[in-house]
Image: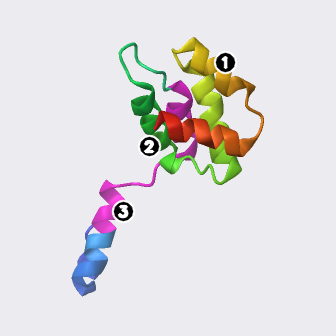
Amino acid sequence: FLTEASADKSYAQLTKLLADLFSPKPVLIAERFKFQQRNQQPSEFISDYVAQLRKLTEHCQFEGPRLEDALRYRFVADIRNSSFKRCVAKVNHRSRAAFFFEVAS
C-alpha cells in the first residue's frame, strides 16, 4: 500500500488514500438489501421506525418520487399498527403519502 512513491504525496493525498482504504463506498445491492430487511421492532414507535428507514436509504440511491415510493412500500409492508397501515395503503397520491410520513416522523 505505502510505497516509496508515497513519500512524494501530500498529507491530504495520503489521508484520502487511507480514508478510501478504511472507509470503502457502500455496495448498492447490500444497502438495498438492508433496507428491505428492516422491520419494525415490537416496542418501536412508528416515528423511530420511519427515521431508521430514512437513514437506511442514505446509500440506496433512491431519489425523488422513487424514495417516497420505496419508503411507503416498506412502511406499509411491515408497520405493526394495522389501522395506520390501512390508512397509508389507501393513499394513492404522493403528496398525501408524504403527509403520512411527516405525521409519523
Which SS class for mark 2?
helix
The residue under the point 43% across, 32% down is 47
- Tell me the residue that label 2 is attached to: 55
Magenta highlight: main SS: helix
Residue type for callout 1: Arg
Q: Position of residue 16 (x, y in %)?
A: 32, 71
- Looking at marks 3 and 2 on the same chain, the residue that comes earlier in the sequence is marked by 3
Q: Nearer the viewer, mark 3 or mark 2?
A: 2
Apparent side of residue 9 relative to residue 52 in the rendered image (left or right): left
Q: Which range of residues does the magenta coloring cover?
A: 17-37
The residue under the point 37% across, 21% down is 44
Residue 78 falls in image quadrant: top right
User: Residue 50 bears which disc, if any?
Assistant: none
- Tell me the residue that label 3 is attached to: 20
User: Residue 86 bears which disc, if any?
Assistant: 1
Q: Is residue 24 magenta?
A: yes
Q: Nearer the viewer, mark 3 or mark 1?
A: 1
Apparent side of residue 8 relative to residue 59 in the rendered image (left or right): left
Residue type for callout 3: Asp
Q: Residue furthest right?
A: 92
Q: Is residue 20 above or below residue 97?
A: below
- Looking at marks 3 and 1 on the same chain, the residue that comes earlier in the sequence is marked by 3
Q: Position of residue 87 (x, y in %)?
A: 66, 23
Residue type for callout 2: Lys
Q: For the residues labelled 3 and 1, say whether their Cβ atoms are less than 8 Å apart.
A: no
Q: Is residue 35 magenta?
A: yes
Apparent side of residue 97 relative to residue 36 in the rendered image (left or right): right
